[in-house]
Amino acid sequence: MFGFFAKRRRKKIREGDFPGAWAEILETNFPIHRQLSAADQRELHGHILVFLDEKMFEGCGGLVIDDEIRVTIAAQACILLLHREPAYYPTLRTILVYPSSYLAKHPHDEKKKHHRLGESWQFGPVVLAWDSSRRGGKNAFDGHNVVIHEFAHQLDQIDGAADGAPTLGQGEERGQRRQLYRSWALVFSRDFECLQKKAAKGKRTVIDHYGATNPAEFFATATEAFFEKPRQLKKKRPELYEELRAYYRQNPVAWHGSRDR
């Protein structure tokens, strides 16, 4: 019953007016928006409206949250939700935003701290550095985007701890879902191992070397490449590109045009 009312409420929000000032922010800070079809732009606007209605933004380190910050981050998070039944990151309530990189505890040694640009917690907040978030949105063709990276982790964490295998085949029969997971595991494990070998040798790769850390980081960095370097990814790792295309139900090659080098 709750799900029914939530869907109805979200549908009403998506059908609301998208402020002109927000559209101007997208034009300036998120050039991917220009590459989308009119239908995809409308869908993205609707997802942004719901996202900003449901998520709370908190400024840290003296940062004052304004519409530029909220809309710029929301657009990058919501590009991952096109063409699917959006869950709007169900365990996420709060996005913490610092002006720039921030000190955080080292994941394997609480006595150590290191600078970070972002992080994602399964039952906690997403934390982002604003300067990197804005830069990632504006330069949508370099293969690096901290917002897309952290929200890919959120998708990965919906079905449990981040392991590089998000929920696949929702609504499909069990046999079909099993086949989807087998294909995903085969392609991702092979390409993850390939990235590890190339990273160890210092070779240039489409996917950032940080993806060689573990399967969860591989999925997040592969998602960055999928949206920002789709032509290169499709050429170098065609089966990986197809797995991501099927999962995200998008084909960024079609709207990147000649900008992707």
Image: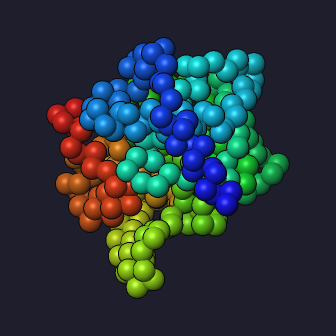
Q: Looking at the image, which is closer to me, 149 or 33?
A: 33
The image position of residue 73, as x and y in percent, is 54, 32
Residue ranking furthest to the bottom: 175
Q: In which quarter of the image is residue 114?
A: top right
The image position of residue 243, as x and y in percent, is 33, 64
Q: Looking at the image, which is closer to me, 105 or 182?
A: 182
Left or right: 88, with 33 as reference point? right
User: Can you say whether 51 is above or below 112 in the image?
Assistant: above
Q: Can residue 116 be seen in this view?
A: no
Left or right: 132, with 255 as reference point? right
The image position of residue 149, as x and y in percent, is 50, 46
Quadrant position of the C terminus in the picture: top left
Colouring chosen for the image of the structure: rainbow
Residue at 72% from the left image edge and 54% from the top image edge = 123
Q: Looking at the image, which is closer to me, 212 or 175?
A: 175
User: Can you say whether 220 is above or below 188 in the image?
Assistant: above
Residue at 22% from the left image edge and 32% from the top image edge = 259
User: Can you say whether 181 is above or below 138 in the image?
Assistant: below
Residue at 35% from the left image edge and 33% from the top image edge = 41
Q: Looking at the image, which is closer to me, 189 or 157?
A: 157
The image position of residue 221, as x and y in percent, is 44, 51
